[in-house]
């Protein structure tokens, strides 16, 4: 085992609920220790700016473009990430001198790998200057430039988790953020891809119809009925018949199929859409899995979990029940990937993003006056 580093990972996912921060001690291969966790929620006004940025990003042709609201959103995202790290320092009793590196994913506002274009906003240089810690960022760009999907990037960490906990393989680790993604962990390189929608459509629906950010615990969906015609329409998408590797943008699936439904029936149907798209992913696994581990915000949606249990061919367990942090696995993953980046280890594989060969990625920003 090479030297383990203390890393902080940051994640602001496509659900846009806030910034998760996590400490991880790792040598880039194994997990030496899990550390403190923190989160910095976005307030409604900040989420509104991010939603505007998602709309503005549709016009981006150059990934460095930060016109209009995108510049405002980038400043806000950078400050929120800094505040998340500072909250973590307080929670863990750490200082900048105790941390070797920060993994900063940024906020994805556009993901079009077929155009070799992926855009994550966030000013890594400004973050490094404020924290006085080296920051690894731009994790996806090298993969996309080489012809890969640029997503998902967490499978290497999922494999490390399975090894640390000694799980009987194969297992499927499902992350339900704004978009759903799954990693099949077996004996070889992980197999991974985006399954379909995670929480994004449900969040957009309840915001549009009720002015609330998300369906807490799946209570709205629990009060509704699944519209089987609308569900069939949603599932009639060529994406689900395309073999992996494959990935999605947050806005790839419209809400039109449920537009005539009530708040409750729409939420139930969209939850069923997420569950059905995950079940459809099983056809692409190299072998049947022994169990599913569910992480991300979707792990708190009891209605969605019940739908997954009813559709999947193996038992479903939340990451929390498996001894992990369902809400912070992706933040931990970017701590892990930051260390792998520093050491030149692969972040993605042909079986996870379709990149021609296993490759590393990421760029390092260093604080101007810190000497680090």
Image (cartoon, rainbow, N blue to C red):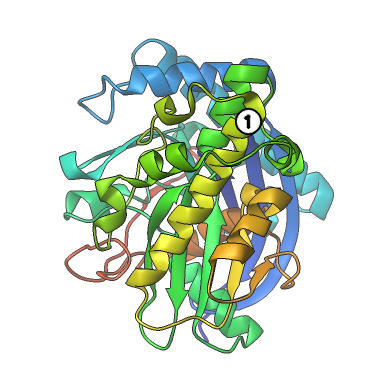
Residue 76 x/y as whole percent: 56, 22
Residue 92 x/y as whole percent: 80, 54
Would you call the spot at circle 1 few (<14 residues within 10 Å), some (14-19), or many (20 or more)? Answer: many
Q: Is residue 299 left or right of residue 249?
A: right
Q: Is residue 331 left or right of residue 140?
A: right
Residue 245 x/y as whole percent: 27, 61
**Which residue occupies the foreground of this view, 107 or 217?**
217
Quarter of the rendering containing residue 123: top left
Task: Count numbered badges in the picture.
Answer: 1
**Which residue occupies the foreground of this view, 8 or 98?**
8
Q: Residue at x 62, y 56 (%)?
A: 307
Is any part of residue 40 visible from this angle? yes
Question: For mark 1, what is the residue?
Answer: 80
Residue 129 x/y as whole percent: 54, 35
Quarter of the rendering containing residue 183: bottom left
Whether 297 is drawn above or below 230: the answer is below
**Which residue occupies the foreground of this view, 233 or 92?**
233
Q: Residue at x 27, y 63 (%)?
A: 244
Is any part of residue 372 visible from this angle? no
Q: Residue furthest top?
A: 68
Whether 219 is drawn above or below 33: the answer is above
**Which residue occupies the foreground of this view, 32 or 372?**
32
Whether 29 is drawn above or below 154: the answer is below
Whether 184 is drawn above or below 144: the answer is below
Quarter of the rendering containing residue 164: bottom right
Q: Residue at x 57, y 35 (%)?
A: 202
Mark 1 secondary-structure assignment: helix
Q: Residue at x 63, y 65 (%)?
A: 309
């Amino acid at each position: 085992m090479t030297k383990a580093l203390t890393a902080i990972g940051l994640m602001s996912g496509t659900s846009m609920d806030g910034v998760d921060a996590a400490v991880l001690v790792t040598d880039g291969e194994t997990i030496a220790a899990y550390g403190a966790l923190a989160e910095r929620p976005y307030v409604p006004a900040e989420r509104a700016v991010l939603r505007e940025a998602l709309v503005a990003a549709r016009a981006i042709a150059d990934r460095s473009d930060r016109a209009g609201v995108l510049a405002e959103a980038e400043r806000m995202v950078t400050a929120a990430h800094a505040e998340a790290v500072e909250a973590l320092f307080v929670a863990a009793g750490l200082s900048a001198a105790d941390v070797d590196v920060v993994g900063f994913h940024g906020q994805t506002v556009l993901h079009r790998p077929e155009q070799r274009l992926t855009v994550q906003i966030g000013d890594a240089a400004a973050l490094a200057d404020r924290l006085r810690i080296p920051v690894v960022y731009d994790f996806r760009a090298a993969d996309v430039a080489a012809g890969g999907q640029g997503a998902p990037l967490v499978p290497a960490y999922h494999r490390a988790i399975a090894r640390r906990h000694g799980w009987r393989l194969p297992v499927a680790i499902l992350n339900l953020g704004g978009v759903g993604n799954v990693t099949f962990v077996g004996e070889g390189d992980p197999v991974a891809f985006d399954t379909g929608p995670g929480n994004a459509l449900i969040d957009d629906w309840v915001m549009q119809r009720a002015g609330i950010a998300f369906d807490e615990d799946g209570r709205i969906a629990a009060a509704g009925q699944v519209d089987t015609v609308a569900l069939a329409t949603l599932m009639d998408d060529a994406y689900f018949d395309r073999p992996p590797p494959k990935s999605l943008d947050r806005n790839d699936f419209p809400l039109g199929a449920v537009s005539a439904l009530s708040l409750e029936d729409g939420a139930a149907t969209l939850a069923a859409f997420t569950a059905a798209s995950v079940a459809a992913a099983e056809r692409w696994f190299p072998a049947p899995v022994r169990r599913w581990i569910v992480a991300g915000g979707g792990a708190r949606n009891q209605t969605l979990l019940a739908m997954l249990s009813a559709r999947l061919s193996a038992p479903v367990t939340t990451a929390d029940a498996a001894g992990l942090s369902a809400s912070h696995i992706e933040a931990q993953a970017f701590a892990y990937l930051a260390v792998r980046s520093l050491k030149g280890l692969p972040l993605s594989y042909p079986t996870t993003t379709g990149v021609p060969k296993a490759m590393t990625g990421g760029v390092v920003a260093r604080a101007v006056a810190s000497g680090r």
